[in-house]
Image (tube, rainbow, N blue to C red):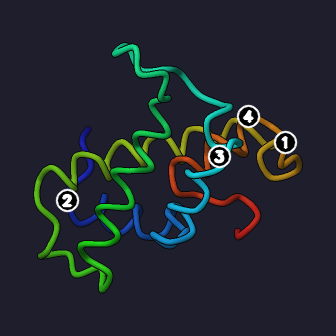
Amino acid sequence: MVKDRETVIEEFNELVNMSAGELEEWLKGDDSTQSGWSKDDGSGETIGHESGRKIIKILSKNPGKDPQKYDEEDVDHMRKVVSYCKRHLAQEEAAKRNTDSKSYKSLKNWGHDPLKT
């Protein structure tokens, strides 16, 4: 069953606990590129790193988090973010204990800092 728009937006805003500025700074660092699956386009960028860039755009264009200001493309990506974060938080305790783990770094690429929870 697909979550409704309202639920996706609510869960995205709970799970993404980094600001656009924090995420942008994180993505500039080497640690952000050292985890995750590479995209198939030969760029060397990981899927999570690309996701982080999309999250920055979503956060920047709607800093007040007004649900009416998200378009369908935003909500589609938010749905992916919610799914990824929930799945990895449920499976990987290492992300909360070890900041050198790929889990920790990957979750941060997706806008969730496990140390903030």
Front tag of 1 and 2: 1
- Compared with 99, 5 (above or below) is below
Residue 61: x percent and y percent?
24, 72
Q: How crowded is mark 3: few (under 14 residues within 10 Å), some or many (20 or more)?
A: some
Residue 102: x percent and y percent?
73, 34
The residue that mark 2 highlights is: 5
Q: Is mark 1 on a helix, strand or loop?
A: loop
Amino acid carrying label 1: it is: Asp
Q: Which of marks 1 and 2 is nearer the N terminus?
A: 2
The residue that mark 1 highlights is: 100
- The disc label shown at residue 18, or none: none
Question: Alpha carbon of mark 3 to alpha carbon of mark 2: how far?
Answer: 22 Å
Residue 44: x percent and y percent?
49, 22
Q: Is mark 3 on a helix, strand or loop?
A: helix
- The disc label shown at residue 102, or none: 4
Front tag of 4 and 3: 4
Front tag of 1 and 3: 1
Q: Quadrant of the N terminus?
A: top left
> Left or right: where does residue 81 sit relative to residue 17?
left
- Compared with 14, 114 (above or below) is above
- Between 32 and 62, the one lying in front of the other is 32
Amino acid carrying label 2: it is: Arg
> Left or right: where does residue 103 sit relative to residue 76?
right
- Between 109 and 24, the one lying in front of the other is 24
Question: Alpha carbon of mark 4 to alpha carbon of mark 1: how far?
Answer: 7 Å
Q: Quadrant of the C terminus?
A: bottom right
Question: Alpha carbon of mark 1 to alpha carbon of mark 2: how far?
Answer: 34 Å
Indicate the quadrant where residue 69 lies.
bottom left
The residue that mark 3 highlights is: 89
Question: Alpha carbon of mark 4 to alpha carbon of mark 2: how far?
Answer: 30 Å
Q: Residues within 10 Å of mark 1 (few under 14, many from 20)?
A: few
